[in-house]
Amino acid sequence: MTTATPLTNNTQLSVNVTTKSQEQSLYQSSGAIVAAIVVGVIIIFTVVLLILKTYNRHMRVRRELEPKASKLPVPPPVGHNSHSLAQQPSVTFIPVDIHMQSR
């Protein structure tokens, strides 16, 4: 008498192998996606830094080449009240300490 081997074992084994290979390929593809995103972020960061560096250099050259405004000294007024007219009132701003405790 010969007994037939059940086909369910072979079918389950092939399903398990197929599932594992699908899971493995999903993990590999998700790892590739994450790596591509990381590389993309690094490339974007590098491009932004290069653009800012170029802009900074351009603005520095523009500042160095633009003519400087020369301040001409104002001659003091002539007369016996010249001392009082030469002094201009000044306003001093004293900031309030934010961390000061109220009593």
Image: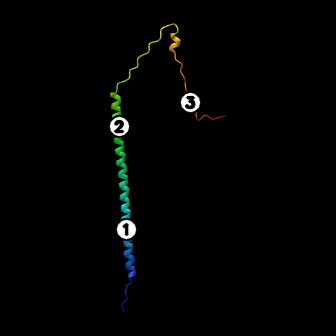
Which numbered dot is residue 44?
none
Q: Are marks 2 and 1 in contact (CB under 8 Å)?
A: no
Quadrant position of residue 47: top left
In space, the residues marked 2 and 3 are separated at their CA atoms by 36 Å
Above-or-below relation of 90 to 84 = below
Total labels: the figure holds 3
- Front-most of residues 35 and 82: 82
Q: Quadrant of the C terminus?
A: top right
Badge 3: few (under 14), some or many (20 or more) residues near its Cα, within 10 Å?
A: few
Above-or-below relation of 82 to 10 = above
Q: Position of residue 52 (x, y in %)?
A: 36, 39
Which numbered dot is residue 22?
1
Badge 2: few (under 14), some or many (20 or more) residues near its Cα, within 10 Å?
A: few
Of pointers 1 and 3, the one earlier in the residue sequence: 1
Which numbered dot is residue 55?
2
Q: Are marks 1 and 3 in contact (CB under 8 Å)?
A: no
Q: Residue furthest bottom?
A: 1
Q: What kind of residue is marked 3?
A: Pro
Of pointers 2 and 1, the one earlier in the residue sequence: 1
> Which residue is under mark 3?
95
Q: Position of residue 91 (x, y in %)?
A: 54, 23
- Front-most of residues 32 and 67: 67
Q: Position of residue 8 (x, y in %)?
A: 40, 80
In space, the residues marked 2 and 1 are separated at their CA atoms by 49 Å
Is disc 1 placed on a helix, strand or loop? helix
